[in-house]
């Protein structure tokens, strides 16, 4: 069974938080997705489980894959291969893992990539500019 885990950048301090995504109640009742949402961490203490407001555009799902250093790979991560190719991680609109994109080409993945997470599209968008 694949681990379901999401991450998002906190609105208040820009730190990453990991857990379950909780949409704003206005989205739940009225379908308005323009608002930010919340991540509820899987902590052990009450403090560790506090929901944190996150920027909606930063929310990304764990792919179920790890990089060559055993770091979890999330949607929005930027990877670099041993030969210098740089990829970003994307999902299809239906929520199925699509693969990695590089220079507008899609590379489908069915096993652990031999690449390293070097950043993400939210903190390090300039890393993708070398492939433009």
Image: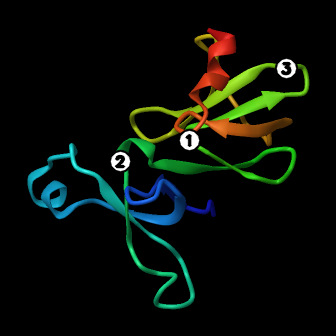
Instruction: Decide if residue 90 is on the left or right side of residue 129.
Output: left
Circle 3/circle 1 CB separation < 8 Å? no
Residue 57 in view (yes/no): yes
Residue located beneath label 1 in the image: 75
Color scheme of the displayed model: rainbow
Residue at the image position 67 percent from the left and 25 percent from the top? 127
Residue located beneath label 3 in the image: 84
Q: Quadrant of residue 104?
A: top right
- Identify which residue, 103 or 50, lies in the foreground: 50
* 77 up-or-down from 14: above or below: above
Residue at the image position 53 percent from the left and 58 percent from the top? 15
Residue 65 numbered tag: none
Instruction: Decide if residue 20 is on the left or right side of residue 5.
Output: left
Give the number of the mark in front: 2 or 1: 2
Marks 3 and 1, how far apart in space? Answer: 20 Å
Circle count: 3
Marks 3 and 2, how far apart in space? Answer: 31 Å
- Identify which residue, 48 or 3, lies in the foreground: 48
Q: Quadrant of residue 101?
A: top right
Q: Quadrant of the C terminus?
A: top right
Q: Earlier in the sequence, mark 3 or mark 1?
A: 1
Instruction: Decide if residue 36 is on the left or right side of residue 4.
Output: left
Circle 3 residues within 10 Å: few <14, some 14–19, many ≥20: few
Residue 49: image location, x then y, percent: 47, 81
- Dot 2: element: helix
Residue at the image position 57 percent from the left and 88 percent from the top? 44
Residue located beneath label 2 in the image: 56
């Amino acid at each position: 069974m694949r681990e379901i885990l999401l991450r998002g950048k906190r609105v208040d301090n820009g730190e990453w938080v990991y857990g379950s995504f909780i949409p704003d109640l206005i989205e739940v009742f009225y379908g308005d997705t323009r608002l930010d949402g919340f991540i509820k961490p899987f902590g052990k203490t009450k403090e560790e489980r506090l929901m944190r407001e996150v920027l909606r555009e930063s929310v990304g799902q764990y792919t179920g894959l790890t990089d060559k250093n055993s770091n979890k790979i999330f949607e929005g991560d930027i990877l670099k291969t041993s030969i210098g190719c740089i990829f970003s991680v994307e999902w299809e609109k239906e929520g199925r893992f699509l693969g990695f994109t590089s220079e507008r080409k899609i590379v489908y993945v069915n096993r652990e990539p031999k690449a390293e997470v070097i950043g993400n599209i939210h903190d390090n968008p300039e890393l993708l500019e070398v492939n433009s």
